[in-house]
Amino acid sequence: MNNFLPASPVAVPLIVAALLAAVNRHIPRRIADALAIAASSWCLLACLFLMIRSSHGLIVYWMGGWYPFNGAAIGISFAIDPLGAGAAAFASFLVVVSFIFSAHYFDSIGTLFHVLMLAFLAAMCGFSLTGDLFNLFVFFELMSAAAFALCGYKTEESGPIQGALNFAITNTIGAFLVLSGVGLLYGRTGALNMAQIGKSLGQTHDGLVVAAFVMITCGFLVKAAVVPFHFWLADAHAVAPTPVCILFSGIMVELGLYAVARVYWTVFHGALAEFEAQTRLIFVSVGVLTALVGAFMCFAQRHIKRLLAYSTISHTGLMLIAFALLTHGALAGLALYVLGHGLLKAALFLSAGMLLHHLGSIDELKLRGKGRDAIRVPVLMLLLALGLSGAPPYGTFLGEGMIDDAAKTLHYSWISYVFMLAGIITAAAVLRVAGRVCFGWGDDLDRSQQEEGETDEGRETSGGPDIPATMFIPTLVLLLLGIAMCFIPGIRTRTQMAAMAFTDQAAYQQKVLEHASPPNYETPPQESLVPGMVRGGISTLLAFLIAGLVLLPHPFRRGIAGFSGGVSFILRPLRLLHSGHIGDYVAWLTAGVAVIGGLFAYVIH
Amino acid sequence: MNHLAGELFRMLPFIVAAWLFVVGLYGIVTSRHLVHLIMCLVVVQSSTYLLLLGVGYKFGAAAPIFVDIPVGTPAVDPVTHALMLTDIVVEATVMALLLALAIQAEERAGSVDPEQLRIMRG
Amino acid sequence: MNHQMRTALFLAGGLGFFCFYLWGLHGLPGFGHYPGPYGDIINALTVYQRHATDAVTAVNFDYRGFDTLGEEFILFTSVMGANLLLRKQKDDREEDPPLDRADGRIVPPTSDAIRVAGLALVVPIVVFGLYTVAHGQLTPGGGFQGGVILASMPLIIYLCGDYNAFDRVTSHLLSEIAEAVGAGGYAVTGVIAIFFGLPFLTNFIPLGQTGDVLSSGTIFVISVLTGIEVAAGLVVLMISFFAQALVYRKPGNENRRLP
């Protein structure tokens, strides 16, 4: 069992996927569902177990029995720590939820959906657990290949194809950026194991190290949908089927950021340690830009899934800010924020899926007032919106609190206002949707119509008079877990201990290459939760205020309408930039890499 | 002058690799046909292969096949070769996936010109 | 953004990126001066540890076999994905018999010389493909290369004959099953090692004599499985693409132009 458990999150889903592909149309759908849920549940349990076991020390597992030779790694290792195993466990959990939710979907394609999802799951688990840089790239490619196919599934409509193309081309370029960076590092160090590369690089910070750092980081930030690499995400989410969207927003995008953190802390930390302040400044700025662009674009959408996609971009900007603080306290907050946000965002996409199933549309304006007979869905959306603004007792509130505490010690306390602003605007957008769909509030006409692209989506399921339990119960469970995670005893302490191990480069190298025993970390003191509660409360109230101003009839109606007309006019250039043309996206991507590279070359050279 | 020529020769495959990357991206940005765009993506991919192969080469060394040469003769790096050859076959299939998307785009939208495929805007 | 703005933005960004990349490449040891140590260690150890004389295949299927497992499944997933994307739509009908069409051209009938040449090439291609797969651990070759060679056999039949000949030689069902068996078999070989108390993907078969075809333990087995998977996967791709182009027709879309 000791030999099987660390490799099983990758081996089991792949074997079951191959099995399901071999028996494609010859087994009933329910058996395929059962096998797939069994395989992903095994991954969930295995990763949870690995998470608990690795809190006592990094678990290092060499594939093929190839242990290091004279201090050089000749095989591929898994280096399992609580944060990585936790990410893999969360991915497995969302895949289980997705399989349950998709009971009414995909009737016509046999088991192809299950095969692609299980390959996707294996890739996400391998990605989170690996300790080898090229292996990271391989699982990145596997994740992407499965995602492209799942995204373009609805071939009867034009939108999904174009969305999938934009997604595929930008992410493939990101993968090639990562591979080029890995090639540069291999040329210098002759190693592909992350611990060994980190050790070989030592503290040199010349052009090659900076170029490799920027290219690998930007490649992964394309996956993480950070401005200006973010254009593909809204296109992909708007068209992918709902069970797939929850994975994209819930964990796939966040894994891009996980890879940036992992590569920074294991490979580049030694070389770039003296430039921490500059690195922090650059990435915090990128994060702030992403958070604001995402938030404003979110509020301007009427396609509900596209609205949620932009809110994911906004929150990813916040997560990048959290990583950019480069301390273990902020990293712990980031881990909790990812978990909390992932649960909420998955539940929001499931709610959108339920609306599409029951009412046949996902256009906020077309659905005006129609949600009254399925009132539990808008109510769920309302409750979930509270989490987006960081209200207690949601998981996002917990994560934000830890991030703000870390920021205060670094004189970056102003980022809490950015968090609040992004949270308010995205939550207000969801509240607006809930209010309009449920109660029919708000204008009939929408003035910001000029440059609209696709605003609606065809049915994904055959529809029905009621919302089935396989759809509603998973959504409710996700909401409850998002709240319950705050009450797990000692969750903040345990996450901080895990983050301390994650950011300890020397201990990682020694454990992987020399089997040293882990050092003891002292338990960090826990800050009070009260400032966070105040902040969360204020954000939520402001979100309600904004949504109410837009929707409800009140004496200042004209003024507000004029104001929002003015804001739309100012935002029009921003909306025009999101043109749907793949050439634009790639031009922005190149410019983004050049700018970030130029900034780092300037500060480090 | 000699120094410059020496520097150029030392870095020639890598300069070509960087050039291919940028030229491929240029092709993608200015493309008017999806199949052409995907082929430009293949050009970007070739840039990474050239980089990997260039990094692993040794002057005066043999291929890492020890059938007819004794173990211990200097040989080039087999790891980059291994990384590259699986990558070629695999990326060919990923490009096939993209071409399938391009075919369906023509089916549904009636065009393979990225200028016409802008439904995902706003 | 219009064409000029886009190009201008890219030229600025591309130039900056090019200079940045060159600055990074400047730090490399220079072409022809590989510093090691990874490649040198493998070159020294391969023959002794695995009785395999082809170091590249040994790296692919043993030292870094886990990577290759992932790559194989990327191939598997892409083929499944292309299958999914090119599937028959609800309103498609199948054209019978499928004709090789080209709009605005008269397709000349295939000459007998080409047919004979194609038929004559079939056996050498298959033999060469099997040879390449089986000798991967000895000389340059292995599952990936041999699989691609094997997959070119149905393609030659299509090119030298017509779609009906191709259809008769290939079977969608068998190819899909073969592909799944090849991919799954690789992972299962890794799991079998666990039953021997070894880590995932460790060799558990006796290594044999260096230079024999049946040597190098699991490298040979995995190479053969990979060859099956790559060949079958590429055949499935061909079948899907041909079906999309030649067989499926939308109602009212008889003389469709192909892209």
Image (spheres, helix red, strand yellow):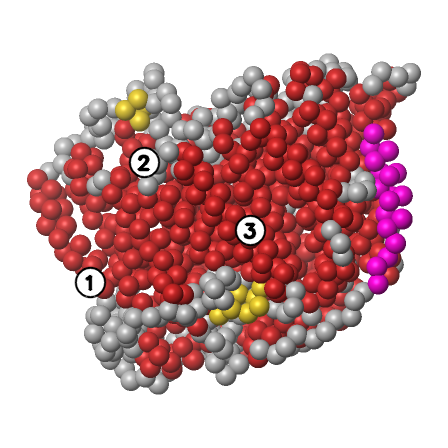
Circle 3/circle 1 CB separation < 8 Å:
no
Where is residue B105 drawn, in percent x and y?
45, 31
C150 sits to left or right of A593: left
Is A272 a magenta residue?
A: no
Amino acid at pointer 2: His
Q: Which residue is mark 2?
A: A26
Sequence-first disc among 2 and 3: 2
Amino acid at pointer 3: Leu
Instruction: Give the chain letter at badge 3.
Output: A
* Residue A440 in which image quadrant: top right
Looking at the rendered structure, the secondary structure element under dot 3 is helix
Could you confirm whether marks 2 and 3 are on the same chain? Answer: yes
Q: Residue at image x 80%, y 27%?
A: A547
C58 sits to left or right of A116: left
A459 sits to left or right of A440: left
* Residue B57 in which image quadrant: bottom left
Residue A261, numbered label: none
Q: Can see residue B90?
A: no
Q: Residue at image x 81%, y 40%?
A: A391
Q: What are the residue bounds of the magenta stretch?
A: A525-544
Q: Residue at image x 58%, y 43%?
A: A94
Instruction: Give the chain letter at badge 1.
Output: C
